[in-house]
Image (tube, grey):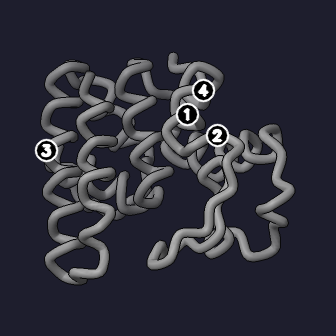
Amino acid sequence: MANFNDAIVKTLAKEGGAKFTDIAGDRGGATKYGISQTAYPNVDIRNLTEQQARDIYKRDYWDRVRGDDLKSQMIAENLFDTAVNMGVRTASRLAQSMLDIKPADGIIGSASLGVINQQNEKEFIVHFTLVKVGYYASLCNKDRSQSKFLLGWVNRALGGAA
């Protein structure tokens, strides 16, 4: 089964680590370790510790994509990182739609888990990467102000395919 400690190291690096940012136009607002003020209004983002960030990621992202129950570390890390980047429900729904799991409700239950665990790792990652890039493009087509983030999102998606 997949291991959270291996996954979180990679995601924290992608999220910029301990660097505090507050980028104009970023809907998340102030961010540290990838934890945003918008998503966690009651958290002191500026003083957030790495352990606090890890605890949030474990509880609110890894556990919700059933990371501990996924057989493939590669798939678990990719689904987890995508959940961190675009939200658990969106990431889960994209994976479910890609695998023709109905309903694609954004909740990784036992049926979704069973289908995901039967996937070939490399094929899953390639297809999921394409689905993510398409999703990011659709966000920018709906709201041109988000286009400045497209290259970063695509690079992140492609990095998950390596």
Left or right relative to 106: residue 43:
right
Q: Give the residue drawn at x 82%, y 53%.
A: 48
Q: Give the residue drawn at x 24%, y 48%.
A: 154
Indicate the amino acid at tag 4: Val
Crowdedness near tag 4: few (<14), some (14–19) or many (≥20) residues, C-alpha within 10 Å: few
Crowdedness near tag 3: few (<14), some (14–19) or many (≥20) residues, C-alpha within 10 Å: some
Q: Disc 2 marks which residue?
A: 17
Secondary structure, mark 2, is loop
Residues at discs 4 and 1 in contact (Cβ within 8 Å): yes
Crowdedness near tag 1: few (<14), some (14–19) or many (≥20) residues, C-alpha within 10 Å: few
Indicate the amino acid at tag 1: Ala
Secondary structure, mark 3, is helix
Q: Give the residue drawn at x 20%, y 30%.
A: 124
Q: Is residue 8 above or below residue 61?
A: above
Secondary structure, mark 1, is helix
Q: What numbered label is drawn on residue 37?
A: none
Q: Disc 4 marks which residue?
A: 9
Q: Position of residue 145 (x, y in %)?
A: 29, 81
Residues at discs 2 and 1 in contact (Cβ within 8 Å): yes
Q: Disc 1 marks which residue?
A: 13
Residue 5: quadrant of the picture: top right
Q: What numbered label is drawn on residue 130?
A: 3
Earlier along the polypeptide chain: callout 2 or callout 3?
Answer: 2
Q: Is residue 120 above or below residue 91?
A: above
Cα–Cα span, label 2 and label 1: 5 Å
User: Is label 2 or label 3 in front?
Assistant: 2
Residue 54: quadrant of the picture: top right
